[in-house]
Amino acid sequence: MTGGGTAGAAPQTLQERDRRLLAWLGAGLLAGGIPTHEVEQDLRTLATTLGHPRAQVACLPRGVWVTLSAGQPATFEGVEGGLRLEQLADGTALLAGLRAGRLTPEEALASLATLRAQPHRYKVPGLLAGGVLSGVGIALVLAPAWPSVAFAALLAPVTVVLMILSGRHRTISTLTPLLAAFSTALVAFSAASAGLVTAPLWTLVAPIAVLLPGATIVTGLVELAAGSMVAGTSRLGHGTVQLLLFALGVGAATALLDVPGELLDPTRPVELGWWAPLLGVAVVTLAISLMESLRLALVPWVMVTAVATYLGQLLGQTLSDARWAGAFLGAVVAILAATVVEFVRPQLPRSVVFLPSFWLLVPGSFGLISVTQLDAGPAVAFSAVVAVTLVIAAIALGIVVGASLAFPLRRAARRVGLLHLLRRLRRG
């Protein structure tokens, strides 16, 4: 099942079948990181297609309630764990198939019942390789210096091991941010003291960037802006606590080693040329494909969106010399680029090619570096908090603006997909 529960007995009535289908599908979209208000809208649209125009849907990050009409029985489905982008792509393809009439509810239920059990396409070696490449790619983008790149390649396997263990043990899952930040910071500050790396704050971020809650925090702000107050507040609170756990890990390593203040300088190391961030974008795209078990056919489209996002972010920073402006423009471009991809390839969900762009907008990375400045004094702490708040708010605003601009394109993409279906039916 997509939501993470156990498949029960077969539905006894058509209404029970449709409620279960909507609940399972909604739980899967939530597990894939889709904002709650978008899931509610998608489920209501699908319910109308299934013949239930008065259906009511309520979503939280951890569950979804569905009833086909006011006063009628409701179905709840909880969300346990996340989904890989590959599984999210399959789930959104089921949604599109149901809307277009290519799938029956019974076929969709059968697919959803086995979706979470799908094995990782590249198994543990692919996950390990993706983790190493993600560290290298993020280092090329954030801290383009050979020592930082080498550090990321060497420390990234520790993050992968923690990711694997966190999926098996709840305690390790809770402590993963603290453990990852502490172990990485311990090595980074030791290496910096020995003169092996510069700017250890930026250097230590790259190996653990895949764990940072930047996407969670920004999604929470987007939900708040859309009126999903409970979901947005809970997601924002969870992401903030996760970020504080990372900062606590870095702070513990700093205290243990008695790190001098000059090693906490937040200045980025820039030793490589203009080509380094672009190469980093390509490497990160490959890393995402390996870690998220994406099919090779999807990789070029993810690459297009990632490159467009980086260039938009770079243009914004160049025009205004402000990090928040680059974050805003990068988010707008990311949404528009993903929507254009969906227009060209109607069967490719926008969310699958958009979500990896969070790795390049790096709100979590910048947030961690800013939060670690809290020990430097009230003035520095206030400036750091304001800076990271502006960046995260700018990304959220960029997503809202980009989604508004992309709405006509999304409608056109769905019409194109429907036209393709009608042409195929006529040919058949």
Image (spheres, rainbow, N blue to C red):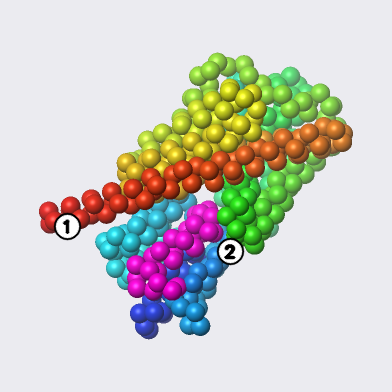
Residue 168: in sight, yes or no? Answer: no
**Which of the numbered marks, if any, corresponds to residue 425?**
1
Residue stretch rendered in magenta on the structure: 29-55
* Residue depicted at 18% across the width and 52% down the height: 423
* Three-letter residue code for mark 1: Leu
Instruction: Name the residue rendered at 33%, 61% in the picture.
Output: 99
Residue at left offset 46%, top offset 78%: 69
Image spot of residue 330 (x, y percent): 54, 34
Is residue 177 in sight in this rendering? yes
Main SS of the magenta part reads: helix
| Residue 252, position as x, y percentages in the image | 80, 41
Query: Counting residues from the N terminus, which is met first, the one under dot 2 or under dot 1?
Result: 2
- Secondary structure of the residue carrying tag 2 is strand
Residue type of the residue flagged with mark 2: Leu
Between 39 and 254, the residue placed more toward the observer is 39
Indicate the secondary structure of the residue bearing disc 1. Answer: helix
Please state, as top left, top right, bottom left or bottom right, where the C terminus lies in the image. bottom left
Q: Residue furthest left?
A: 427
Q: x%, y% of residue 82?
A: 53, 56
Label ID, residue 60: 2
Q: Nearer the viewer, residue 290 or 277?
A: 277
